[in-house]
Amino acid sequence: MVLLRYLVLMEYLVLSALAQGIRIAAPANGMIVSAESELTVEVQKLNSIASSIEVAIVIGFLNCGFPAPSPSPMDEVGAVLFNGPYHPTLHNGVGYQNFTVVIPEFALPGSAQLSVVHFNLIGVASLV
């Protein structure tokens, strides 16, 4: 019976974590960019039933090796293009924030990966 309680708790925690997601809404997959060019990254906050306080995000860039695929963004972020606060604002029912980043000078021709790491406090309410 105790094991069942832990399993239910773990399932709740996993579902809560999955519900606190973000996604890269722009640029579109397959967009062509060049080294040292500016790029606007739109990071959307997905809808959630739990309260959360946004803390920070990290936006990374990683050249993809050929013919090997890129590692999962969960395994490697790559070169950090942005590291700082994340304060999405609501527009037409969607919370998002735009970031202007510069593609590194060492970017190689071919495929690359843009990734975002998200830090937030789940299940808390802001006192401010």
Image: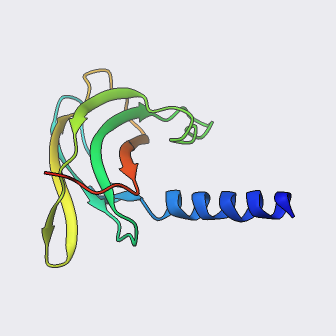
Please identify the quadrant where the N terminus is shown: bottom right
Residue 65 position within the rendered picture, expressed as x and y whole percent measured from the top left: 54, 32
Residue 99 sits in which quadrant? top left
Residue 120 position within the rendered picture, expressed as x and y whole percent measured from the top left: 36, 46
Residue occupying image coordinates x 60% and y 58% = 14
Residue 37 sits in which quadrant? top left
Task: Name the one closer to the observer, 22 or 122.
Answer: 122
Asked whether residue 36 appears in the rendered view, the answer is yes
Residue occupying image coordinates x 75% and y 57% = 6
Residue occupying image coordinates x 31% and y 38% = 59
Task: Name the one closer to the observer, 90 or 77.
Answer: 90
User: Does 9 sit above or below residue 82?
Assistant: below
Residue 67 position within the rendered picture, expressed as x and y whole percent measured from the top left: 61, 37
Answer left or right for 128 relative to 6.
left
Residue 11 sits in which quadrant? bottom right
Asked whether residue 32 appears in the rendered view, the answer is no
